[in-house]
Image: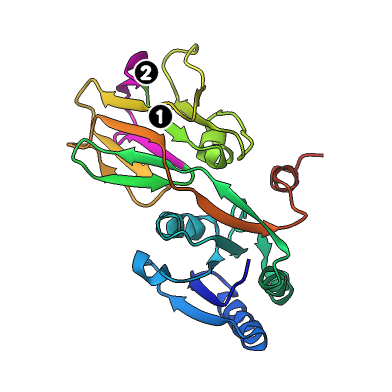
Amino acid sequence: MAIRKLALVVNRAKPGAEAIVAEIGQVARETGVTVVPVEWPIAQANLRGADACCVVGGDGTFLGVAEAAAKEGVPLFGINRGKLGFLAAYPAEDVAASLRSIIAGNCRREDRALLEVRFADGDFALALNDLVIKTRDVFRMARLAVKADGHPVNTYRADGLIIATPTGSSAYSLAAGGPLIDPAASVIALTPLCAHTLSNQPLVFSAESEIQVDSLDAVPLGLSVDGRGTLDAAGRLPLTVRTAKVRLGILRPAGLSHFDVLRSKLRWT
């Protein structure tokens, strides 16, 4: 792919971010690429017309750009200044070489599935990782009814539920006991949080499924889409979750596989 216009989103709270910006500017001048700074938090229109978007920060910063980038059809790549770097795959130690490699087309594009979350009030959001439904009172459980394609699945007495994409299976869902899923798989994962019944295990649905979640009691609930702040669930349930029609392009090193990342980040042998 040809990159002539590069949007640049920087989490300036991350240590070393300014030095990375300077390196990117130097490489851009040498290669004739126009860099367009985009302020954080971003407005979707600021990505319009870009050939790609570079995110300097951690996975949280990357997730904060994902919805807007998917809507504009702009592929993302991340330079990791966070802790894990599952999504921000390029190391901060060799920014110039990484950027030259991407501009030269020596990278791999992966089109990742997103979740479309539609709330009862008509609002909707896209998630690259997950939707989390959780009790606001840490000492109470909720009763959450789940349907798939209109058919009852289960009523969970639990602290909450995580509905995750294959990409998000290595995030909060994994910490809650959910399955690790290859990002290329066409599925949706549902993981209960501290379910009252031990037989309530994680479920994996077809990517074509439409999942509905409703509350059966008055326990106050919060909703979070990709960790982008907490929404009050009042008036937003029932909600439906399905695989979005749009996908997000992610640029990654050509020789880096998903399992390379897992071995590194999860310290597998």
Quadrant hosting residue 251? bottom right
Number of marks in picture? 2
* Colour option used: rainbow
Seen at 46% across and 27% down, the residue is 190
Tell me the number on the disc at residue 125: none
Seen at 42% across and 43% down, the residue is 245
Residue to which mark 1 is pinned:
161
Quadrant hosting residue 220? top left
Q: Earlier in the sequence, mark 1 or mark 2?
A: 2
Q: For the residues labelled 1 and 2, say whether their Cβ atoms are less than 8 Å apart.
A: yes
Residue located farthest toward the right when viewing the structure as drawn:
269
In this rendering, the answer to whether 164 lies above or below 106 is above
The range drawn in magenta is 130-156
Q: Main secondary structure of the magenta part?
A: strand
**CA distance for labels 1 and 2:** 9 Å
Residue 201 forms part of the magenta stretch: no
Left or right position of 172 against 109: left
How far from the left and from the top, in percent, is residue 83? 60, 56
Q: Is residue 228 visible?
A: yes
How far from the left and from the top, in percent, is residue 37? 46, 78
Residue 134 forms part of the magenta stretch: yes
Q: Is residue 43 visible?
A: no
Q: Dot 1: what SS?
A: strand
Residue to which mark 2 is pinned:
156
- The C terminus - image quarter: top right
Residue located farthest toward the front when viewing the structure as drawn:
2
Q: Amino acid at mark 2?
A: Tyr
How far from the left and from the top, in percent, is residue 75? 53, 60
Q: Amino acid at mark 1?
A: Leu
Q: Residues within 10 Å of mark 1 (few under 14, many from 20)?
A: many
Seen at 46% across and 59% down, the residue is 73
